[in-house]
Amino acid sequence: MALAVPGKERLPGQLLRFVLVGGFCALLDYGSYQLLLALGMDGPGLADLARAISFVIGTSTAYVLNKRFTFNATGGLKQVSSFILLYGTTFFIAVGVNRLMLLALPDTSWRSTLAWVVSQGAATTINFVMLKLVVFREKRDSAE
């Protein structure tokens, strides 16, 4: 008989919910990024601001949905502070990777999309691991 590891049996479900929430938030992020670019925020520096704004929109939505839907977490100020610290870090990663990709990629109609996809992929990978292990980690019973 195998011993059950607390929380491990829920990892596949959490990962699936994280992907669904993340997909929705990514569409929200990408849609707002493209909208801001279409509204004229596509010049030097402005594209970075557009990416920053879209990141905040997607992130705010991700916090609310991941807290309840993905991790079923209830937490106070410490949890919110951890989330802000994590997403503050990944904010700079997302915007920085986006900037690097805009500089590295050839000037094509797909450049902003490819830059966004690479920057989002980097941020998303970091976010899942840190949300699972730090921000929304499950409390262990002291009897175990």
Image (spheres, grey):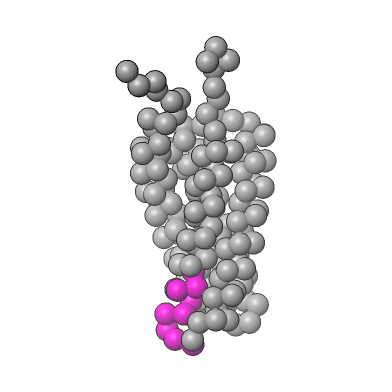
Say which quarter of the image contains residue 136.
top right
- Assess whether residue 110 is covered by the magenta stretch: yes
Work out whether 101 lies above or below 55: below
Q: How far from the left and from the top, in percent, is residue 87?
A: 61, 51
Work out whether 33 lies above or below 7: below
Which residue reaches farthest bottom? 107
- Assess whether residue 39 is covered by the magenta stretch: no
Which residue reaches farthest front? 1
Say which quarter of the image contains residue 110.
bottom left
Query: At 60% across and 66% down in the image, what residue appears?
Result: 95
> Does residue 35 show up?
no
The residue closer to the viewer here, 8 or 66, is: 8
> Does residue 43 show up?
yes
Residues in magenta? 107-116
Say which quarter of the image contains residue 92.
bottom right
Q: Quick check: 42 left or right of 31?
A: right
Q: Quick check: 53 left or right of 19?
A: right
Query: At 62% across and 36% down in the image, what residue appears?
Result: 79
Work out whether 25 lies above or below 76: below
The residue closer to the viewer here, 12 or 36, is: 12
Query: At 54% across and 75% down in the image, what residue appears?
Result: 101
Query: At 40% across and 36% down in the image, what residue appears?
Result: 11
Quadrant of the drawing holding the N terminus: top left
Work out whether 90 lies above or below 129: below
Q: How far from the left and from the top, in percent, is residue 64?
A: 51, 42
Q: How far from the left and from the top, in percent, is residue 132?
A: 51, 39
Q: How far from the left and from the top, in percent, is residue 19?
A: 39, 49
Q: Main secondary structure of the magenta part?
A: helix
